[in-house]
């Protein structure tokens, strides 16, 4: 944290963090409805980038050996250092920030804004976790992930704080798994991941407990796949992933049966891609990923029958390990972060409106990272991001994003 920050706190933590690199600017930290001002001076690069230095275990920094397939781990030697973090000299006056449950105001919110939450407790630093938003119960779930060893824990975000639900019976520890929310059956659905090998187990969370359906047929064990729920056709869609073998299959889960779909056209097999469902156009959106040789910058959509590739005039660069959610309030997909060849870890925020990609200009952002969890909270109209990793180590920071209004 900046060494000369003067704090005068009124309650417990939610922060609108303005990154600073040697500049002097006014910032306001928002504390669950109260706020106090601080003068930012010389900033620690870790804090300026959004990484909580007090929780960073340098020994835990990920290397390629921690990936499901060791060859699949991003090459940290190409990752940017902290000097690539956002230029705080351009940071907006943080009085335009919002606090929990309050719509943002001022020019910064008209352009989009990230706000960081500081909470008394929360999940440990980790990467390749999975998150889903449980609409029926109004809370975000985070399960497991890799923090130097698989973490077998369930955390719930209620919009203000994290709650540890480790007391309930849990699926086995894993990472690079996938979760999504079945809004018709009101279940969070989890599949696969890595733990001493690729997993093929299916789990569902009903708000009280986990159960594991055992259908007669289903996808092979895999990690680094992606899933999204198609609320029009009432089915979970799974694509890609792999382990020793790269997979390019499309599967659907209807709550009872797995069905492998065999479309005429399909994206090439890949891992560490991202998917979300666009209910406006009734299609799954897929972007990017990595096949062990190639990084992808392609955009595909699934209409329930076939895949088709979109070729917008402008698109994000090739990447893997990014995160993608659907902003139901504004009718567009939001993508953050990832890892790009020749560039390293990314901190860009992009949006997809069904036809075009747009890079959102932001002066404050989470630090560049790979493998973060990302969900959209329709109650407050904001996307929630947690964790991930870069060459600096595993992260455990919590952020919310409000898109341009």
Image (spheres, rainbow, N blue to C red):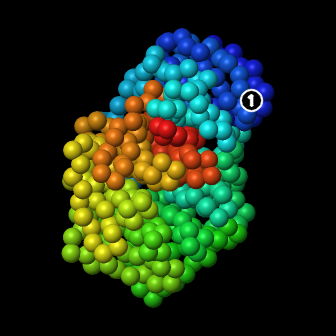
Total of numbered circles in the picture?
1
Image side of residue 263 versus residue 41, left or right: left
Residue for point 62% across, 47% down: 380
Residue found at the very far right of the displayed protein: 10
- The image quarter containing residue 26 is top right
Q: Which residue is mark 1?
A: 34
Image side of residue 239 versus residue 144, left or right: left
- Quadrant holding the N terminus: top right
Residue for point 59% across, 31% down: 105
279 is higher (above) or lower (below) than 316: below
Q: Element at badge 1?
A: strand
Residue found at the very far bottom of the displayed protein: 216
Q: Residues within 10 Å of mark 1 (few under 14, many from 20)?
A: some
Can residue 365 be spotted in the picture? no
Can residue 331 be spotted in the picture? yes
- The image quarter containing residue 18 is top right
Residue for point 69% across, 15% down: 6
Residue 13, percent across and down?
70, 34
Q: Nearer the viewer, residue 239 or 182?
A: 182
Residue 48, percent across and down?
51, 25
Image side of residue 92 versus residue 344, left or right: right
Q: Nearer the viewer, residue 308 or 247?
A: 308
Residue 33, percent across and down?
73, 34
140 is higher (above) or lower (below) than 233: above
Residue 164, percent across and down?
70, 54
Image side of residue 377 versus residue 178, left or right: right
Residue for point 28% across, 59% down: 300
């Amino acid at each position: 944290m900046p060494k000369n920050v003067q704090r005068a706190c009124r309650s417990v933590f939610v922060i609108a963090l303005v990154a600073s690199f040697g500049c002097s600017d006014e910032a306001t930290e928002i504390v669950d409805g109260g706020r106090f001002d601080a003068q930012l001076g010389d900033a620690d690069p870790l804090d300026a980038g959004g990484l909580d230095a007090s929780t960073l275990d340098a020994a835990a920094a990920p290397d390629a050996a921690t990936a499901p397939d060791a060859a699949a781990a991003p090459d940290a030697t190409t990752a940017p250092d902290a000097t690539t973090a956002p230029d705080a000299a351009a940071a907006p006056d943080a009085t335009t920030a919002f606090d929990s449950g309050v719509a943002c105001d001022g020019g910064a919110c008209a352009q989009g804004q990230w706000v960081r939450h500081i909470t008394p407790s929360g999940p440990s630093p980790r990467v390749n976790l999975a998150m889903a938003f449980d609409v029926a119960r109004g809370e975000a779930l985070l399960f497991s992930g890799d923090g130097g060893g698989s973490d077998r824990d369930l955390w719930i975000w209620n919009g203000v704080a994290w709650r540890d639900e480790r007391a309930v019976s849990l699926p086995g520890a894993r990472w690079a798994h996938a979760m999504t929310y079945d809004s018709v059956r009101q279940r969070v659905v989890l599949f696969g991941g890595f733990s001493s090998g690729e997993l093929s187990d299916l789990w569902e969370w009903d708000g009280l407990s986990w159960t594991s359906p055992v259908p007669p047929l289903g996808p092979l064990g895999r990690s680094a796949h992606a899933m999204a729920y198609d609320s029009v056709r009432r089915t979970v869609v799974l694509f890609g992933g792999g382990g020793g073998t790269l997979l390019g299959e499309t599967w659907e889960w209807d709550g009872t049966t797995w069905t492998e779909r065999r479309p005429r056209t399909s994206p090439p097999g890949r891992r560490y891609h991202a998917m979300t469902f666009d209910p406006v156009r009734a299609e799954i959106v897929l972007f990017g990923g990595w096949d062990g040789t190639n990084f992808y910058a392609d955009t595909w959509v699934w209409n329930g029958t076939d895949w088709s590739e979109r070729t917008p005039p402008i698109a994000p660069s090739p990447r893997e390990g990014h995160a993608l959610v659907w902003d139901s309030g504004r009718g567009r997909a939001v993508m953050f972060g990832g890892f790009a060849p020749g560039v390293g870890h990314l901190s860009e925020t992009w949006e997809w409106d069904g036809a075009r990609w747009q890079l959102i200009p932001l002066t404050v952002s989470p630090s560049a990272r790979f493998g973060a969890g990302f969900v959209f909270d329709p109650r407050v109209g904001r996307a929630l991001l947690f964790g991930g990793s870069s060459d600096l180590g595993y992260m455990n920071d919590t952020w919310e994003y409000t898109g341009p209004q």
